[in-house]
Image (spheres, rainbow, N blue to C red):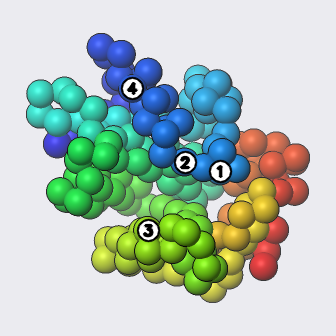
């Protein structure tokens, strides 16, 4: 397994399909916007590939200052629970040895039909060495916990990433809880 920013043999389309099927509507940005931000150098797309080049998953990151936001991370259903996610996250953390990789996850303490999944997701990141930040956010109306791989990031610095990369309108949808 390896991660790559090269997209051959329709990999980008496979990433788009996995993206569309993996995240709730209220948490998705338009794929075209993310491609535009990639072309502007503000977002990085990583494919997670098997040794024979099959797509196992993807990661999308946004970088600003000392923060790298792991904005989206998904593993193909057939590759889940096989260590692919842990290996991919470990490789990503090596890409950003300085500063902090930040992850947002739905708050597992809020009752929901997918609460078990939310708890597993939180535990995955904790096992991978991330820690929960001392604040939670409402991100476009979705209550999220914020985790980091490094030093605590002040809320205003975290929020500034949204302003600088996605604009003032996006920043207004990042609210401290």
Q: In this view, does 82 lie to the left or right of 6?
A: left
Q: Do the residues labelled 3 and 1 touch (CB within 8 Å)?
A: no
Q: Is mark 2 on a helix, strand or loop?
A: loop
* Rendered image quadrant of residue 113: bottom right
Residue mark closest to the camera, 3 vs 1:
3
Label 4 Cα crowd, 10 Å radius (few <14 / some 14-19 / many 20+): some
Residue most toward the left? 51
Q: Residue visible at 31% across and 77% down?
A: 127
Q: How far apart are marks 1 and 2 (CA)?
A: 6 Å
Residue picked out by circle 1: 27
N-terminal-most mark, 3 or 1? 1
Q: Crowdedness of circle 1 by 10 Å Cα count: few (<14), some, many (20+)?
A: few
> Whole-percent x and y of residue 174?
78, 62
Asked if the residues shown at circle 3 and circle 2 are in contact, with their CB atoms under 8 angstroms apart, the answer is no
Is residue 76 shown left or right of residue 154? left
Does residue 91 appear left or right of residue 70 in this picture?
left
Where's the C terminus, which quadrant? bottom right
Residue 15: x %, y % from top left: 42, 31
User: From mark 3 to mark 2, how far is it between C-alphas?
Assistant: 13 Å
- Disc number for residue 23: 2
Quadrant housing the N terminus:
top left
Residue hosting label 3: 117
Mark 3 vs 4, N-terminal side: 4
**What is the secondary structure assignment of the residue under circle 1?**
helix
- Tell me if label 1 and label 2 are in contact, CB under 8 Å: yes
Q: Nearer the viewer, residue 94 or 8?
A: 8
Compared with 7, 151 (above or below) is below
Q: In this view, does 48 lie to the left or right of 138?
A: left
| Along the viewing direction, whichever of 146 and 96 lies nearer the viewer | 146
Residue bearing the label numbered 4: 14
Residue lying furthest front: 113
């Amino acid at each position: 397994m390896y991660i790559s920013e090269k997209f051959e043999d329709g990999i980008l389309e496979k990433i788009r399909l996995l993206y569309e099927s993996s995240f709730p509507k209220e948490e998705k940005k338009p794929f075209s916007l993310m491609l535009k931000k990639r072309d502007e150098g503000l977002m990085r797309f990583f494919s997670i590939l098997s040794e024979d080049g099959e797509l196992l998953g993807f990661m999308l990151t946004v970088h600003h200052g000392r923060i790298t936001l792991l904005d989206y991370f998904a593993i193909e259903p057939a590759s889940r629970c096989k260590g692919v996610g842990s290996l991919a996250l470990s490789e990503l953390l090596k890409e950003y040895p300085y500063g902090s990789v930040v992850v947002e996850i739905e708050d597992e303490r809020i009752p929901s039909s997918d609460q078990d999944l939310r708890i597993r997701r939180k535990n995955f990141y904790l096992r991978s060495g991330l820690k929960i930040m001392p604040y939670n956010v409402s991100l476009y109306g979705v209550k999220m916990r914020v985790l980091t791989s490094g030093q605590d990031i002040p809320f205003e610095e975290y929020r500034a990433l949204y302003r600088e990369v996605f604009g003032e309108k996006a920043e207004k949808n990042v609210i401290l809880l």
